[in-house]
Structures are given as structure tokens and as C-alpha cells.
Amino acid sequence: MNIARFLALGLLAFSPVVLAHPGHESHSVVAGFMHPLTGLDHLLVMLAVGLWAGRIGGAARWQLPLTFVVVMALGAMLGMAGYAIAGIETFLAATVMALGVLLVISLKLPRALQVGLVAVFALFHGLAHGTELSSEQGVAVMGGMLAATAVLHVVGLVFSASRWRLPVLVQSLVGCTMVVLGAWLMAV
């Protein structure tokens, strides 16, 4: 079985959990914590930020994940305050694809651009969630989401650490999967 068929079958198998923002039916910290863990797009983006930060090394290991969490919180507050972007799901799919590309290629970018990209990605994710939540219930849900986001960033960092380092081929496969998934999310 070639790699394209394998990836296609994987995407079909996970298509029910790929829907980026099905709703937040329960408005609790636990529901918020589980949300990034149950959507494949969220899971991959959060892990990818940690993997990319670990691959870059140095201060990026804390700057990129911290930037994501802080800006996602700000985006969520903006969303809960009524700010929205039309077609946000397309932007979210683009973040999946962009982080996939960044994992595949080893392009040296200035730190300001790295932090800026992560901030834009986080803003879109925060806005998407914030617009779906009322300010009364949103604080608890977003608290859980931010905690899960930080945990997933740390897991990505652990997988890029020297002791647990994923082979470059595996990181590239994750990146390629993210590009395909992002393209599929744009198409649906």
C-alpha cells in the first residue's frame, strides 16, 4: 500500500473527530480540556508547536509555546467580546497546513517571525473558540483548553528533546500528514 492511500485511509478513519469546532456542548473546565484532545486538527497543531519549538531549540522552546497560550487566551477574550472573522475555519485549516510545512522543511527564520507566526495561529484558534462561547461560561471552558494546549506543547517538546527525539523522518511524516489534513479541511 503506498503512502498516499495510507494517509487517505487514516483521514477517513478520523474524519468524525476532525471537525474543528463541533460545539462545546458542556461548559466546564473538563470539557475545555478535552476539546484539543478530541479534535485531530487541534491535537496536531498543539503538538506541532512544541515539536517546532524543540527543533529550533534555545529560547524558542519556551517562547513559542508561551506565545501560543497567551495569544490564544487574548483571541478567546476578543471572540467572547463579539469580534469574529468570517471563514475562520479556513484560517484554522491554513494553520494546520503551515505548521505541517514548518515541520517538514528546516527553514531558518528570524525569531521575531517565528513568534509572529505562532501568535497569528494562536489568535485564529482563540477567536474561533471565543466566538462560540458566552463570556459567562467561556472562562471555565477556555481555562481547560489553555491547560490542554500547554500540556500538548510540552508533549511536543518532549518528543523533540534529545532523549526522546523523534526521527526527522517521523517529524516529516507528521508534517506531511498535517499538510494533507489542512488541505482536506479547506475542501470540506
Image: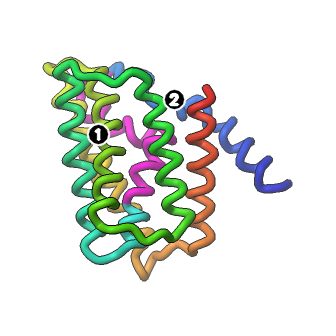
Q: Position of residue 158 (x, y in %)?
A: 38, 69
Asked whether, in this view, residue 138 is left or right of residue 121, the answer is: left
**Callout 2, which amino acid?**
Leu
Mark 1 or mark 2: whose residue is earlier in sequence: 2
Is residue 63 toward the left or the right of residue 154 in the image? left
Question: Picture coordinates of residue 34 (x, y %)?
Answer: 36, 38
Residue picked out by circle 1: 123
- Image check: 5 left or right of 144? right
Does residue 164 sit above or below 52 in this rendering?
A: below
Residue type at mark 1 is: Leu
Picture residue at 32% right of the left edge, 60% below the top: 113
Asked if the magenta segment contains residue 99, the reply would be no
Alpha-carbon span between mark 1 and mark 2: 19 Å
Magenta span:
26-49
159 up-or-down from 4: above or below: below
Residue 37, quarter of the rendered image: top left
The residue pinned by badge 2 equals 19
Dot 1 falls on a residue whose secondary structure is helix
Q: In percent of the image, x 17 and y 30: which residue is there?
A: 77
Q: Between label 1 and label 2, give the one nearer the viewer.
A: 1
Q: Which element type, helix, strand or loop, lies under badge 2?
A: loop
Question: Is residue 147 positioned above or below 168 on the image?
Answer: above
Q: Nearer the viewer, residue 73 or 29?
A: 73
Q: Nearer the viewer, residue 106 or 162?
A: 106
